[in-house]
Amino acid sequence: MMRILSVALLASLLLAAPAHAVDCDNATTQAQMTQCAADMYSEADKLLNQTYKDVMAKLEPARQKALKQSQRDWIKYRDSHCKAESSQMLGGSMYGTVLNSCLAETTTARTEKLKEMGK
């Protein structure tokens, strides 16, 4: 019983510890590279979502409906495309890096297309 409590206490302390930011310019381990790729994708996704909202606000209802469907279709494409592109790494330590890099790159390209639509 005491051992279970000790393990639970240690686990809670580890989970409560602040996360250390990864210096992506100097990432050397696979874990760091994967974290950087995930962070890049997260930022790209935030920008995509904001751009989508901005463009939607400029469009008349018929174009909003078309863009909404297009965006849904594009998300399915992006996810499927990046899973296929990273599938050669499935089960390996580089899988997350390759997947997130693809998601970031594809999302950034879509953001640029959306910006063009909003002009």
Image (tube, rainbow, N blue to C red):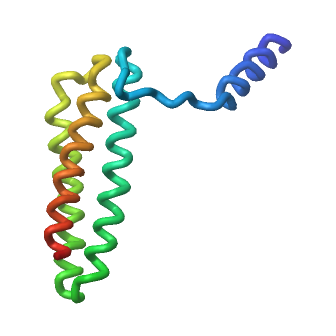
The residue sitting at 15% across, 35% down in the picture is 84
How many numbered callouts? 0
Classify residue 6 as left or right of residue 90.
right
The quarter of the rendered structure image containing the N terminus is top right
Viewer-side residue, 109 vs 9: 109
The quarter of the rendered structure image containing the C terminus is bottom left
Classify residue 100 as left or right of residue 20.
left
Task: Indicate the position of residue 33 as horizontal and vertical percent values.
Answer: 34, 24
In which quarter of the view is residue 66 placed? bottom left
The residue sitting at 23% across, 80% down in the picture is 64
The residue sitting at 19% across, 30% down in the picture is 86
Viewer-side residue, 60 vs 23: 23
- Residue ranking furthest to the top: 3
Classify residue 118 as left or right of residue 45.
left
The residue sitting at 69% across, 31% down in the picture is 16
Task: Indicate the position of residue 88 as horizontal and vertical percent values.
Answer: 16, 23
In which quarter of the view is residue 85 placed? top left
Above or below for 109 versus 87 = below
Viewer-side residue, 39 vs 12: 39
Above or below for 58 versus 29 = below
Task: Indicate the position of residue 53 as horizontal and vertical percent values.
Answer: 33, 71
Classify residue 48 as left or right of residue 39.
left
Task: Indicate the position of residue 27 as horizontal and vertical percent values.
Answer: 37, 21
- Residue ranking furthest to the front: 25
Above or below for 111 versus 78 = below
